[in-house]
Amino acid sequence: MTETEKKAGRSARPMPRALTPFRSGQYRMLAAALTLSLFGAGIWVVALVWQVIELGGGPSDLSVVATAMAVGMLATVLLAGALADRVPQKRLMLAVEITKAVAIGGAGALAVTGNLEIWHLAVVSLFYGVAEGIVYPAYSAWLPALLPAEDLLPANGVEGVLRPVVMQAAGPAAAGGIIAVAAPGPALIVIAAAQALAAVVLALMRETPVRREDMGAGNPVVAVARDIAEGFRYMVRTRWLLVTLLFASLLVLAVMGPIEVLLPFAVRDQTGGGAGAFALVLAAFGIGGAVGSVVVASLPLARRYLTVMNLCWGAGCLPLAAIGFLDEVWVMAAVTFAVGFTFQAGTVIWGTLLQRRVPPALLGRVSSLDFFVSLALMPISMALAGPVGEEVGIPVAFLVAGVVPAVLAIAAVVGFGLLRDEIEHPLAPRPEPADGASPAAHPA
């Protein structure tokens, strides 16, 4: 075979399925903007914690700041889901990145000049939460306008890898380095620069029209309220969706506060580590999530997909029970790697489940409801974590965070008909009939 023939053979090979979305220039720009935004978010997680500590704050102060961000997301996400079906999504995402760049840049300027106070961080966190509440519904609604249907699943897979690798690994690692060399203030400036660059990339993209014909008659506010109510009605009458979302909200209550508020103090007090050690523990969570995403995406969907998904989320928290008793950073990192693996494995199944079983006309609103219900108890979890950790101690708080979700997962699967539901609604493709006839479509 000649060299020309070899090159022709190589060029004729199909692109790996996971990379097919990158054939679109618009998607490449969206992925670049998403990467920059996630990188800034990853730095924010670490910089915010150490900025609070540098200002003399403790777990209760961090609870206040973290709660402000959760409240901002919670207050915005339902409206954001309705807006994403009515306003060009590019405008929403561009507004998000500009808001984050201005708010965090302002906090960074106050920090480097020595004028920053904890209440400033709480206000910035509130704005950050509002912006983040808009991102998920807008991104989910925009993606189908940029890519053909066959590229949506691999595009979701790309996000499933980017989020843990960039936001939970690369961002925290960069934050640890910046804080070690300089201080949290310069890290905030870097975040603002990343968000500004993301805004520039989004501004260069083309605007796509809203993919919806019927906006509803009458007052726009009433129409938006009807949209939100329709999504709630679908959730309430769909058992597998309602049960899973209720379980997820209780999971957030048990787990998010200890992870977001108490984990940095566990690293500092039990291992003697600083920002770099905390960044390593967070990075391990992100790397575990990336590995879990790739592993699950590479395997056939489990027949018992609801059981596997809920147990990944619930039983996957069990390693957290050991956090309060560990004094080595690498062991904490191994724990967070395992939790990240199972969390993201369950999330990949969840994304596929929504795409397969939720009617397309409702998918945007169900996505915002998913985000809303998952966040509903996050402010309470954040607010309680600091005082509870100070009252009962970090070891007891993490013991509860590890054990309770596993019990809830078993109760959700066994006690609410999910075992029967997943068998009655299989998502794995049926084998082709021996006579070559097309199989009958099964309900999803």
Image: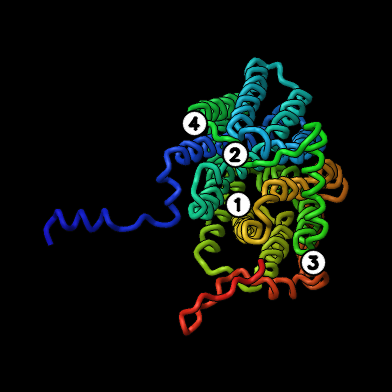
Mark seen at residue 42: 2
Mark seen at residue 306: none
* Residue on which the image places disc 4: 205
Q: Is residue 358 above or below residue 442?
A: above
The answer to whether mark 4 and mark 2 are in CB contact below 8 A is no
C-alpha separation, residue under disc 1 versus residue under disc 3: 25 Å
The picture quadrant where one finds residue 219 is: top right
First-in-chain label (2 vs 1): 2
C-alpha separation, residue under disc 4 versus residue under disc 2: 24 Å
Neighbourhood count class around disc 1 (C-alpha, 10 Å): few under 14, some 14–19, many 20 upward? many
Tell me, yes or no, if residue 426 can be seen here. Answer: yes
* Residue on which the image places disc 1: 285
Residue closer to the observer: 273 or 97: 97
Q: Secondary structure at mark 2?
A: helix
Judged from this view, the residue extending furthest toward the front is: 217
Residue shown at 74% from the left, 74% from the top: 419
Q: Secondary structure at mark 3?
A: helix
Residue closer to the observer: 376 or 61: 376
The answer to whether mark 1 and mark 3 are in CB contact below 8 A is no
Judged from this view, the residue extending furthest toward the bottom is: 434
Residue shown at 79% from the left, 66% from the top: 412
C-alpha separation, residue under disc 2 versus residue under disc 3: 32 Å
Q: Secondary structure at mark 4?
A: loop
Q: From the image, state whether disc 1 or disc 3 is nearer to you.
A: 3
Q: Amino acid at mark 3?
A: Ala
First-in-chain label (3 vs 4): 4
Residue closer to the observer: 168 or 311: 311
* Image location of residue 225, percent across then percent down: 81, 39
* Residue on which the image places disc 3: 412
C-alpha separation, residue under disc 2 versus residue under disc 1: 12 Å
Q: Amino acid at mark 2?
A: Gly
